[in-house]
Amino acid sequence: MPRRCSRSTCNDHAAMTLSYHYATATVWIDDLAESADPHAYDLCERHGQRFAAPSGWRLEDRRNRFRVVLP
């Protein structure tokens, strides 16, 4: 069963996983994790593209840009 976006009013399919580390003020956006993690947020494409890190935080996009999509 496909996972849904973590945003409360969104029912779109999750496309990426957002996680963070307070000590280093870092936010990571990764390819969708294989399983749900209670310490991370799954986001749809729209919400992931609109996400902005809080002021003073660093955002690292670690997604694989060259994924193979099979029909």
Image (tube, helix red, strand yellow):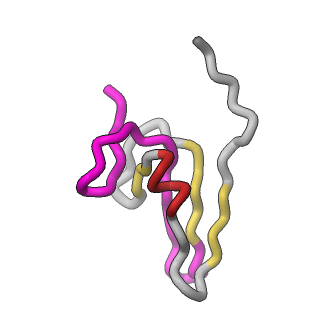
Look at the image and tell me in which quarter the N terminus lies: top left
Please determine whether, in this image, residue 16 is positioned above or below residue 23. Answer: above
Q: Is residue 45 left or right of residue 61?
A: left
**Main secondary structure along the magenta-highlighted residues:** loop
Please determine whether, in this image, residue 63 is positioned above or below residue 7. Answer: above
Q: Residue at x 58, y 62 (%)?
A: 28
Residue at the farthest top position: 71
Q: Could you tell me residue 20's position as x and y percent? A: 51, 68
Q: Could you tell me residue 55's position as x and y percent? A: 55, 86
Please determine whether, in this image, residue 53 is positioned above or below residue 46. Answer: below
Frontmost residue, 61 versus 36: 61
Frontmost residue, 13 versus 26: 13
Residue at the farthest bottom position: 56
Q: Residue at x 35, y 37 (%)?
A: 3
What span is colored magenta in the figure? Answer: 1-26
Q: Is residue 39 left or right of residue 62?
A: left
Disc tally is 0
Q: Could you tell me residue 16's position as x and y percent? A: 51, 46
Q: Could you tell me residue 41's position as x and y percent? A: 40, 56
Q: Is residue 41 magenta?
A: no
Q: Residue at x 48, y 36 (%)?
A: 34
Look at the image and tell me in which quarter the C terminus lies: top right
Residue at the farthest left position: 9
The image quarter containing residue 14 is top left
Q: Residue at x 45, y 55 (%)?
A: 47
Q: Is residue 15 magenta?
A: yes
The image quarter containing residue 12 is top left
